[in-house]
Image (cartoon, rainbow, N blue to C red):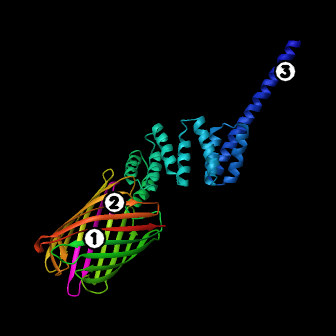
Amino acid sequence: MERERTLRILRIISITFLLGSLAFAQDYQDLHESGRELYHESKDVEALKIYDRILEEYPGDVDALLFRGRILARMEAYEAAEQDLLRVIAEAPDYLDAYYALASLYYWQGDLDPARRMLTRWLERAPRDPNAHVLSARVAVAGKKYAAARTFIEQASRYGAVPDAIDPLLQIMNSPADKYRWKGGVRYEYLAVDQERPDWRQLASYLGHDFGSIIVTAEFSRYHRNDLTDHSVKADTYIQLWKKAYMNAGIKAGLNGTFLPRADLNTELFQALGTRQEAAAGYRLMYYDSLAVHLPSLAWAVYPGNWYLRDKVSMIVHEAVSWQNQLTVRYYFKNADHYVQLMNVLGTDLNVLNNAWMQSIAFALGGSYCLTDHILLTADLSWTRLPADALQRFGGSAGLIYRW
């Protein structure tokens, strides 16, 4: 009799415990569902309270830690968010959403090195995840590591990333947009001319502003050639067009009419094709007091690895028809601000000594180096020869750019 009563009590206790467990499990699931709904509705304060409640009962709940970390990051409580997300990775090293959340957090803060390390760990576990490649490309673009960004974009596209995720990145890489809204600079050029002729000098200063979809630059230059002086003003624009396309348009005016064209108008349309090719078509008009020169052009550029190769062919139409070819070979080092390039121009050029167009060949070796985040140094050495006039020029230029 006593034994039966004991068994009944144990059964009642077991049933009560089971019902309590089921009730809590249901409550636990409901809390998670409510938290997710509030998170996706961006009701962060209410969602945070729910995940705090779950974590009071289950401090190691990785789902709750993940969502709380995301919410804290969105609320810009970055340090607390980082701690939650690091705990998720420590508790569940294969929980890929945690790598995404933590790499995104570092990216939002501008901490690109830890973002890269986290993305590397993510890609080791999920090499075919398009989201991992897209975010890796964003981090690479933010650091101006465009060669790496193009590789990540190609991988993202191969594994199913939607075009809307990668086209804006290509737009950034294939246009002169920068993270700085303003930039100003000065440039000085000195060229020694043979045959005991006077040397050439040029001093230019400019100021530019990025308005978002259009970049505008104003420039003033002073030229001294063959004991003659001329001045010019220039307005230059880069305009964002449709996907992966932009246009460069500008006008330059010679103020004295000594040897510069009275008006020099230029426009060029650029269209990226895929991730590593770009086509361009342009037109330039140089107007002198008694002569108009038309220069239609076509160009093609490719980006193999850290290299940039571009060839531009121009027709020169005035009293006769001639041509000019411009080849640019550039190599990028750690990012787009650090490069060295070789340029070759072959074909017809204007000899300002007698305003005659004649065959010429020119080479320029130059580059860019970032002294600080805001200060950029540019420099080049150049050599030009006009065989018909037996004239040679050799010299170089140096410039400083400040961005803010």
- Residue 43 in percent (x, y) is at 66, 54
Gap between marks 1 and 3 measured at Cα: 92 Å
Give the farthest residue toward the front.
196
Q: Give amino acid for label 1.
A: Gly
Q: Give amino acid for label 2.
A: Ala
Question: Is residue 149 found left or right of 266 in the rendered image?
Answer: right
Give the farthest residue toward the left.
388
Residue assigned mark 3: 9
Q: Nearer the viewer, mark 1 or mark 3?
A: 1
For label 1, the SS is strand
Q: Are marks 1 and 3 in contact (CB under 8 Å)?
A: no
Task: Compare residues 19 and 112 and report the one nearer the observer.
Answer: 112
Residue assigned mark 2: 272
First-in-chain label (1 vs 3): 3
Question: Is residue 264 found left or right of 146 in the rendered image?
Answer: left
Question: Who's the residue at 69% across and 45% down the image?
Answer: 51
Residue 36 in view in this figure: no
Task: Compare residues 245 and 78 and report the one nearer the observer.
Answer: 78
- Is the residue marked by circle 3 packed among few (<14), some (14-19), or many (20+) residues within 10 Å? few
Give the magenta-colored segment's residue range.
271-295
- Residue 288 in percent (x, y) is at 23, 84
| Residue 209 is a magenta residue | no
Residue assigned mark 1: 282
